[in-house]
Amino acid sequence: MVQGVILGVLTAGVYALMASGQTLIFGIMRVVNMAQGAMVILGAYLSYQLFTSFGVDPFLAIPATTAVMFTVGVAVQLIFLRPLHQDDRTQLSVLVTFAVALLLEGVMSVLWSTSDRSINTGYVNASWTVLGYQISLVRLWAFLLSLVALGLLHVLLRRTRFGRAVRASVQNPESARLLGVDADRIAAIGFGLGAATAAAAGSVYGLLYPFNSGSHYDLISQLLSIVVLGGLGSIGGAVVGSLVISVSTAVVASAFSPIWAPMTFFVVLLSVLLIRPRGLFGTAARGAL
Amino acid sequence: MRMRRGVGPVRAAVFFLVLAVAPTFGLAHWLLTMLVFTLMFAVMASAWNLLGGFTGYPSLGHVAFFGIGAYAVVLWFQHHDISSGYEPFLLLPAIGLGVALVGLPIAAIAMRTRADVFAIVTITLLFVGQTLAFNLRDITGGAQGASIVPAPFPADSYEIPFYDALVVLLAVSMGLTWATMRSKVGLSLAAVRMDEDKAAGIGVRVQTVKLLAFCVSVGLTAMIGGIWAYYEGFIYPQFAFDPLISVAMVLMTFLGGRATLWGPVLGAFILELAQQYFAYSLGGSRFYLIAYALVFLVVILVMPRGILPSVRDRLWRRGRRRIVDAQLPAGDGPL
């Protein structure tokens, strides 16, 4: 049980990182990014390639993969999302980003085939024993890395001019535009940031789990549950949502059976929606990050 | 609306007549197989349109109900003998009704959310279904799949009964769409799509029509799932709950035109044939996924409203210009 909680909390960090990108994209543009899972997997493949071809450690590869994925994210926003009409952008964007996910899946399965890959560094199986409980070293580092990345994201949003512009457009896009915020630029950079968090999380994901080009379906369903649970557009909510879901999954897996662990997501999600349709931290008005 | 009276029914009669007599010309097997799949998607797109097109609630999880219908047929005939090959078809209405009832509480929860969150909740439904199908091994056979007694139809006309059943279902779902468009229900659904809160405010029974649309839509989808399972004879969780089927229904409706009678059917004929072609010509490689995604993106970016509404707009504008030209002296027109 305690072992399950420890595992859950450590895993939650990675999910919080992926989900924060997802919720950031939604907050800025009202776009539900169905391609977030595929972007995570693409990030995992990139660091897999760097590791197998050049021996670059996945943790050290993160600056490179985030830079690449930032570019990919900006490109997706400029090519596919900007042309959408404002009035039914939310509905269409779900479809467009789903198509982007399929496109990425197709590209990945052509480039890396569909068999499972995993990144096997020397320290994958190392662990510490604290008070009789095992703590996997990789998961601990992954957790710390996620905390650092989330902290950076927080600083970026709270302490910089760009962050202020982002928060302004989340709260009131019209006023932000009137005050000289370039909405298109914010949207493009915002999507890039979301993709960059996916890349960072992807490097770690590749260390923790085996993955293939179809893995993004599992991932996106979990990510969507997390952001809906936390309330779309709230980064704090994304963190709490991933804690709730990842801990309950790990506990169910260790207490009952791993087979039923994925179901925990959906049971938690449906029961929360029954009580609070807008999620734990969602607000009726447009949220604040 | 601006159509001359009588054109609609004639068009429908010709379409279904052609569909009904087509197999008697002794079409090749591969062509019939393609038609069977195209009709499956035509019915499903048309069913999806009843919910997603008319109310604007974009469900991405319809394949969950497709899968339930498929497993319902397989499980029923694992425990009951088939007396004649047509028996599974007679079971379909019961399956449709049962799934519609199952869908009612699900819809009541899912539809507490609005468009974007609804899409997410329905997509989690899909994964719930898939997980259950994989894990309830005692019932579904899990990843090993489940099989049904092969349909006892002669090999050279094996597809015909399925084809006929699908034509009937297509007529049913298009008939329902037609009836919806001409009734108060259709107007209520349009009101939900445009502004649900205002509609509720002026006394439209939004909850009732929303749930009705959902249940009818998933019931029809489940019946197609049943036909598919019987046709294939062997089903696996990953194919009975394939996210691509969900996406295809949505895409076909968007391509042809949301909230139109013929749009989803047109979309199904174009896309399913295109997909079969890609899968055939790009074969074993996964390039067909890329091609499919690109078609998807181009459709939405170029014609966000779909083929039929775009074409109709253009025709209408041309028609109006002609009238205006006739009435006004040159150079004075408002256009």
Image: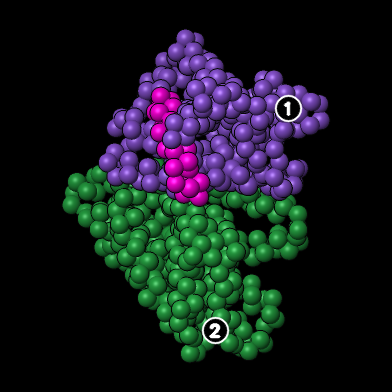
**SS at badge 2:** helix
Q: How far apart are the two marked residues, 2 and 1, measured between alpha carbons?
A: 60 Å
Q: Quadrant of residue A59?
A: top right
Foreground residue among A28 and B227: B227
User: Residue A182 location, x and y as percent?
Assistant: 50, 20
Q: Nearer the viewer, mark 2 or mark 1?
A: 1
Query: Which residue does the image show at 40% across and 33% down from the upper left?
Result: A244
Residue that numbered label 2 is attached to: B161
Query: Which residue does the image show at 25% across and 54% down from the upper left?
Result: B207
Kind of residue sitting beneath label 1: Gly
Query: Which residue does the image show at 64% across and 75% down from the upper left?
Result: B33
Up the image or down, B302 lies above or below B181; here it is above
**SS at badge 1:** loop
Residue that numbered label 1 is attached to: A122
Give the colour in which the image draws chain A.
Answer: purple
Which chain's residue wears label 1? A
Region in magenta = A232-261
Foreground residue among B302 and B232: B232
Give the colour in which the image draws chain B.
Answer: green
User: Residue B243 location, x and y as percent?
Assistant: 54, 54
User: Residue A21 location, x and y as percent?
Assistant: 52, 28
